[in-house]
Amino acid sequence: MKHRHILATLALGTMLAPVAALAQAYPDRPVTIIVPFAAGGPTDTVSRLVGEVMSRELGQQVLIQNVGGAGGTLGAGQAADAEADGYTLLIHHIGMSTAPTLYRNLPFDPLTDFTPIGLITEVPMTVIARKDFESASLADLVEKIKAEGEALTYGNAGIGAASHLCGMLLMEAVGAQMTTVPYQGTGPMMTDLLGGQIDLSCDQTTNTTNQILAGEIKAYAVTVPERLANLPDLPTTAEGGLPALEVSVWHGLYGPEGLPQEVVDRLQAALVAALADETVIQRFAELGTTPVSAEEATPAALTETLTSQIATWKPIIEAAGAFAN
Amino acid sequence: MDIFASLGLGFATALEPMNILYCFIGVLLGTLVGVLPGIGPTATIAMLLPITFSLSPVGALIMLAGIYYGAQYGGSTTAILINLPGESSSAVTAIDGYQMARKGRAGPALATAALGSFFAGSVATLLLAFFAPPLARAALSFGPPEYFALIVLGLLVSIALAHGSILKALAMIVLGLLLGMVGQDIYTGTPRFTFGFRELFSGLNFVSVAVGVFGVAEILRNLESEKNREVMVKKVTNLWLTRDDFRRITAPVLRGTALGSVLGILPGGGHILSAFASYSAEKRLSKTPQEFGKGAIEGVAGPESANNAAAQTSFIPLLTLGIPAHPVMALMVGAFILQGITPGPNVINDEPALFWGIIASMWIGNLLLVLLNLPLIGLWVKMLTIPYRVLFPAIVIFACIGCYSINNNIFDVYGIVFFGLLGYVLIRLGCEPAPLLLGFVLGPLLEEHFRRAMIISRGDFSVFVTRPISAVLLALALGVVILALLPSLRRKRAEVFVEED
Amino acid sequence: MAARIVRDDLIAGGIFVLLGSYFALEALNYPLGTPFRMGPGFMPVALGGVLVALGLAILLKSLRGGENVDQHAPPWRAIVLISGAVVFFGLTIRGLGLVPTVFITVAITALASRMNNILAALIIALGMTVLCTLVFAVGLRVTVPLFGPWLRF
């Protein structure tokens, strides 16, 4: 076993000491997954749920390290710079595909500076408003946005956040601009929406389901093609007459560029096992999402999603004129 | 379900032997990790979060809440003993607590912190039990203009933090505000004052600023002449409060509890102001304000109570609305979700045993905390008898590791050096570090709320005076300024404030 | 009261003027925006200006004279050694790992006190290395390796 790995390593011409050391028994020490957002957020939650099961599968502790800041690019950059030994990984969401357009001086390339491992989940989003907002349906809402435009305020959780992307897409689909109010994270944004300080937003079900069920905020539509099990009365954007507004927050697991194949295989197997875990499935369901199938939890599927999403978001972001340097 | 039945359910849950044990373990671990220099409640919870994963939801959350108060108290302990606050609230405790320790009164300072915290925690827990939902609603009427006005008021009132020159204190606040703006602008994403380093995009770390301007600067001051220090440590006298101390702390504890309870409910930054506001209030109401900054026990009692009351009531927006008021609460949200409970308006109805169990356990946690810590005071004070030449390298290395392990960002470590030197120079020149720290934590909030208020009002400045709460707060702020500028009062101020040490 | 220039205030005022100017001038490179949509430059320019004004006020007041406070000489040895030790920690914690970095950092720091000789510094460093390893690596399981990648092989 040991010999085969070392031979394989030599055959690849990789003489790097760490790789040879690691080929003996990966993983032989705790694995760190960088989450480029603050602890407690939806991406953090997804990562911790998956990380816990992966840790059982790998027989090593999986530590979640929150490196927030710069719309997720700081943590992603740190992961890109880390040694490609499989001990530093990254879980990032849809922001990975929008960063190249949003950030003009991005120090990494999402397509070439990472080794994709697999998709994890796609979280649907909901179009929401303060609870006393007048519009009765999505169609009404579209009319109102067209009529009042910048008199309406749309809150988002910061540059590059899912709520920012959904907002751009919504305004493009409707064909009118609202006044965007950025916040630092979902928490403060939700506070002001609950308090009626702002009119509208659009955020992941992770953050909104509970508030919608409690009647604290109004929901107009869910941004995926099918209705959700735990919000069965909420129409989809297509049913509501706005099919162009289709977006979900997909999450992927990456390693730094040049991760050895056997490490990728080991991690991908652990990921697939985590996504089939009862608790993970149940917790994901409570968050309004499901794990992707085993076929999608693969490097190929992640690469494909990433490539196509970069192409999708580029014109939308450029049209909105949003840049974060 | 009426409130007493609910509380009964809560205590039934919290008093289960296993839950008491979890609560105790949480308080103990929180205290032990929190006393490590440079490690405050946020870092403690982040580090200890994983150990709660395997517990039941109620057990896990009770333990986490315990870790939180424990860490908060542990942070105050280091602030008092070695002038190293781990979180913004304990920065205020450091001002007079450390001076008390220097005078050999570390014991009474720690006891005051423990008793004040316990009292405040108990009252705030009751408040939480009886009025959580309506209070959370009321807090929602605070929008960006109100928060901006509140922060302006807080900044102006806090000039009282200084015991030297008022001009220098103002300059330190403004410098702090500016330092707080280092990093990426949240509205446009523009990086500011980062010299192109991405490590600075998310701003300077509070802990490196605090460890630098308080801890390292103080070490350098002490190393100026090493003989003085050894003498002062020998003077450690009684560990317990005198009758006179009790008399002096009663009113500050009551006022601090009230102030902290109210401010803690506001999710947009109220809890940060609580300790600072209480300190300012005590100094203004005191008959002997010249003692503040030199070891006034009121300066420990008020802020510590305010701080702990706010720590409790900041659970209100979380438990009733699912809104995290600060980073610690955000971590708690994560912990809830991992346990399969999404915090939100439904928790109180869907999970009554959990909701009331947590509230009951908060009181039990505070009780355990005080029972655990009063006997420990003797031990902590003993730490001061460690020769300084051994103690200060320990402080430096713990601060480095603690600071680094928060974000694994080496710039946070370099920040210690930068702020240590800046702090040392400025303190030598008669400026004080506490106002700088206040400005630093409030700077980003001030700008964020101001700009957001302007966006929502579409550029109309009158929003600050047409909204009643904001207008009242700004009127109060104006009153503070006028009071400070009144000529008759100025002479009195001159005696009080422009007295150099 | 002797009408001497207050040296400390003069320097403090100067430092505030310098820092304020830096922030204000640097912030002028960022968009100022409009009242409706304020740019990233607005607040720092305004506050930088306020800091310069406060610094000038402190400066002017110092010229009017007052008492100078006598102070000890700055502990140059401690300043250099402690700054150096912390920077060393930052530079090597990832590469050397916890154990060697802590040992060397503490040894350098301890020498900042004139009451510690080399032997004492080494003893303190040894003790702190054991303590930190127990607290952070064994107890809290921080993600820093005990011996870093520079020391493998």
Image (tube, coloured by chain):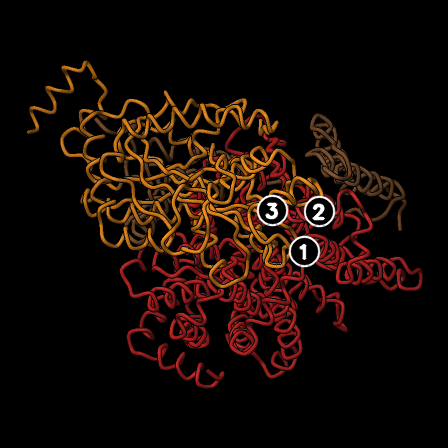
Chain colours: A orange, B red, C brown
Q: Chain of mark 2?
A: B
Q: Is residue B290 left or right of residue A228?
A: right
Circles 3 and 2, Cβ within 8 Å, touching? The answer is no
Q: How many marks?
A: 3
Disc 3: which chain?
A
Image location (x, y in percent) of residue B288: 75, 71
Q: Residues within 10 Å of mark 2 (few under 14, many from 20)?
A: many
* Residue, disc 1: B143
Q: Nearer the viewer, residue B367 or B467?
A: B467
Q: Mark 2 falls on what kind of element?
A: helix
Q: In this rendering, which labeled residue sits more in front, label 1 or label 3?
A: 3
Residue beneath disc 2: B456
Residue at 64% across, 35% down:
A176
Residue A141: give its label: 3
Q: Given the image, on which type of amino acid does mark 2 rest?
A: Ile
Query: Disc 1 vs disc 2: Cβ atoms closer than 8 Å?
Result: yes
